[in-house]
Image: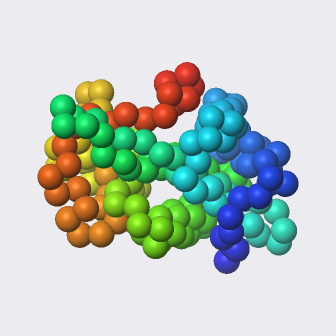
Amino acid sequence: MPRIRLETASDREAVFRVNALAFGREDEARLVDALREGGRVALSLVAEVDGEVVGHVLFTAMAVRSAAGAQAAVCLGPLAVLPARQRQGIGGRLLEAGLASLREAGHAAVFLVGHPSYYVRFGFQPARVFDVHYEDDRDAFMAAELFPGALEGVSGRAEFAPEFYRFS
C-alpha cells in the first residue's frame, strides 16, 4: 500500500514527472507548477511506494459566483498516478485522504472536471444537481459535499483559478 503524505518542496520534480507521464504530456505538470506559484494550493498530497513518488493529487481554491456574491469552494485536479502504478487503488487512496483532510479543515465542497464513472464512487455527482454550472454542464463537471447539505442554497457558476484557463 502506498504511503499518502503532504507534498514537500523536495517532491516537486517527482510530482512534475508523475503528472507528465500520467497524462502523456506536460500541460498538467505545468499547471501544477503555475497553481503553486500563484498561491492557489489548498492541499497537495503525494503517494509514495518504497520511497518513490508514484501519485499526486492537488486541490486548489475556487469559488461559486452568483449575483449575491461568491461562495468559497475547492477544486480537485489534477489527480495523477504513474502509468505503471495505475489500477492499483493509489488514485483512490489519494482522493479519499484529500477529501478527509479537506473535511477536517472545514471545507464545504469539492468540484472537478473528470471521468464521471470514476468519481461517482467517491460521492461526486453532476454539479448541476446542486445548481452549480460550468461551460456546457456536461456530466464531467462534478461536485461532492464534504458534509450533508453543504451546497444547500449555493448556486451559480464555477470560477476556477485563472491558471486552469491557460492550460486547458
Q: In the image, 12: left or right of 112?
A: right
Between 109 and 134, the one lying in front of the other is: 109
Residue 157's x, y, as percent? 26, 34
Q: Residue at x 62, y 41 (%)?
A: 39
Residue at the spot 42% in from the left edge and 42% down from the top edge? 62
Residue 161, percent from left and from top: 49, 34
Which residue is at a point 18% across and 32% down the rendered structure image? 67
Q: Is residue 162 above or below residue 154?
A: above
Tell me the quarter of the image containing the N terminus. Answer: bottom right
Residue under the image location 48 percent in, 45 percent down: 61
How are the colours assigned in the image?
rainbow
Q: Would you place residue 40 above or below residue 85 in this image?
A: above
Q: Is residue 144 above or below residue 4?
A: above
| Residue 150 in which image quadrant | bottom left
Q: Residue furthest top?
A: 166
Viewer-proximal residue, 95 or 74? 74
In the figure, is residue 49 to the left or right of 142? right
Question: Which x, y percent locates residue 55?
Answer: 67, 57
Query: Seen from this angle, which residue lies furthest front?
Result: 68
Q: Is residue 158 visible?
A: yes
Instruction: Count every numbered label the image shows and give the total.
Output: 0
Q: Nearer the viewer, residue 109 or 4?
A: 109
Kindly tell me whether residue 87 is visible in this rendering.
Answer: no
Quadrant position of residue 16: top right
